[in-house]
Amino acid sequence: MLTFRRAVPDDSLRLSELTLASKAHWGYDEAFMERARPDLVVTREYLEANECWVVDNDGEVVGWFSLVDVPGSLLLDNFFLLPGHIGAGLGRQMWQKALARVAERGADRLTLESDPNAAGFYERMGARRIGSVIAPATGRELPTFEVVLGSQPKYVSKVRIVREKGPIRRAYLPAEPEPVMFGTHDEVREHYGTAPGQYPDHATTLDYVVAAAAG
């Protein structure tokens, strides 16, 4: 289960190691990593001065991000995942948390400077490229992005579906303490070619759609 907590100064060493490992994931050589290292080390002072969030997945620290006040917006200054978790969907949840924090703080604009290899992720998240900057430590050109929060969805449903067996699905829905079971019954069961008694009868997803539309 993914959880978020505010970083504390004692996280500095662990987050530095995580950040360096995440950056190295893109295949940079040792010379590049050495040049980039000063910008990747997380200090106790940085964690104390800025809004930093640690991402925990089932007891393991797997990522972190930070928000920094800049004129006219908030800057997503760090956004890193352990290499083994890149591409597993955790980045999207981190992104949603970051946007939620921007909204909670009353800001309407988020900006960021991206590693070129991560630019595609931010584009998929709906960020718009607005230019580029040169990284002082490495001399590389980094794409810059912005998100105007008024253009973001007001609500993203967090539904998790677990397939049990045959047509049976267990759905974990927001605000529901217990999962909801979906399946087949009557004519729908016949349509899917399952025999009476083969699987427990449950309401179908179509039944819920009709109910949501008030009949």
Image (spheres, rainbow, N blue to C red):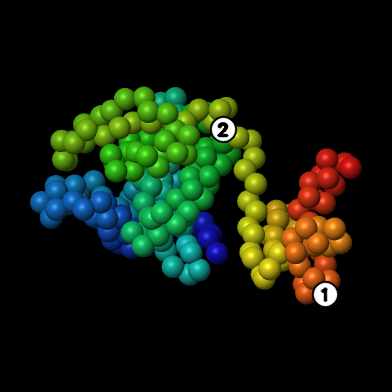
Left or right? Give the position of 172 relative to 209.
Answer: left
Q: Is the C terminus in the top left, top right, bottom left or bottom right quadrant?
A: top right
Question: Depth-wise, is mark 2 or mark 1 nearer the camera?
Answer: 1
Lower position in the chain sequence, tag 2 or tag 1: 2
Q: Mark 1: few, some, or many residues within 10 Å (few <14, many ≥20)?
A: few
Q: Are marks 2 and 1 in contact (CB under 8 Å)?
A: no
Above or below, comparing residue 174 to residue 165 in the picture? above
Left or right? Give the position of 49 relative to 206.
Answer: left
Q: Residue furthest right?
A: 215
Q: Nearer the viewer, residue 3 or 169?
A: 169
Q: Residue furthest left?
A: 31
- Numbered circles on residues, count: 2
Whole-percent x, y for residue 203 in the image: 82, 59
Is residue 7 shown to the viewer in this render? Answer: no
Residue at numbered disc 2 = 152
Q: Residue at x 70, y 56 (%)?
A: 173
Whole-percent x, y for residue 113 in the image: 33, 36
Whole-percent x, y for residue 33 in the image: 17, 52
Q: Nearer the viewer, residue 31 or 73?
A: 31
Above or below, comparing residue 170 to residue 79 in the picture? below
Whole-percent x, y for residue 191 in the image: 78, 58
Q: Nearer the viewer, residue 19 or 83?
A: 83
Secondary structure under the numbered disc 1 in the rendered image: loop
Q: Which mark is residue 197?
A: 1
Q: Residue at x 63, y 51 (%)?
A: 158
Please identify the quarter of the rendering in which residue 138 is found.
Answer: top left
Q: Residue at x 33, y 31 (%)?
A: 144
CA separation in Å, label 2 and label 1: 46 Å
